[in-house]
Image (cartoon, grey):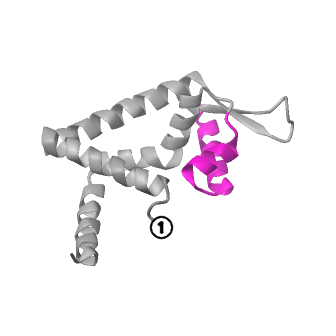
């Protein structure tokens, strides 16, 4: 099998999918401010910025930019860790929690609609293959 040709076809098709408006919102959920907000909400606050950066695999500067923006919007708070004054803890405001929940609901509804377009059999197969690839990459069975 010519995996380069197959990869080219996949890359082109993924580009077409990414240009759909709902896909842009889904992509933002996996990166950017929406991810940061959801991550903090899921943990109930008191998260260190470095933890968020590690989870997203991005620089501390990028996390600082996202946190600054979220703080200006009144969605998060930052305070000094009382147990270690060198650390900052990031919390979530009620508006931040509501925003994270609304965005998560919106994204899940969009993903559900896309899966529904595939039909039950293909949707289940797509999820199975995606899960398998994630597991292989997570376990370093595949070096990229």
Relative to 92, does residue 16 appear above or below in the rendering?
below
> Between 95 and 37, which is closer to the camera in this rendering?
37
- Farthest residue to the top: give it: 94
Q: Residue at x 85, y 35 (%)?
A: 84
When asked about the image quadrant of residue 29, the answer is top left
Residue 37: x and y, percent? 54, 37
Which SS does the magenta portion mostly show?
helix
The residue pinned by badge 1 equals 143
Relative to 1, does residue 76 appear above or below in the rendering?
above
| Magenta stretch: includes residue 71 | yes
Residue 79: x and y, percent? 76, 32
> Between 4 and 83, which is closer to the camera in this rendering?
4
Relative to 98, does residue 49 appear above or below in the rendering?
below
Residue 80: x and y, percent? 81, 34
Q: Is residue 39 left or right of residue 126?
A: right
Q: Residue at x 69, y 47 (%)?
A: 50
Q: Residue at x 55, y 50 (%)?
A: 56
Callout 1: helix, strand or loop? loop
Residue 105: x and y, percent? 36, 30
Give the magenta-colored segment's residue range: 47-74
């Amino acid at each position: 099998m010519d995996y380069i040709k197959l990869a080219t076809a996949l890359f082109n098709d993924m580009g077409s999918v990414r240009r759909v408006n709902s896909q842009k919102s889904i992509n933002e959920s996996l990166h950017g401010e929406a991810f940061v907000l959801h991550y903090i909400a899921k943990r109930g606050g008191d998260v260190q910025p470095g933890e968020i950066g590690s989870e997203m695999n991005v620089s501390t500067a990028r996390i600082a930019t996202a946190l600054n923006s979220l703080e200006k919007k009144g969605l998060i708070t930052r305070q000094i860790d009382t147990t270690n004054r060198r650390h900052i803890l990031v919390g979530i405001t009620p508006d931040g929690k509501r925003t994270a929940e609304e965005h998560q609901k919106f994204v899940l509804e969009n993903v559900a609609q896309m899966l529904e377009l595939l039909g039950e059999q293909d949707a289940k197969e797509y999820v199975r293959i995606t899960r398998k690839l994630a597991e292989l990459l997570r376990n370093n069975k595949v070096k990229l």
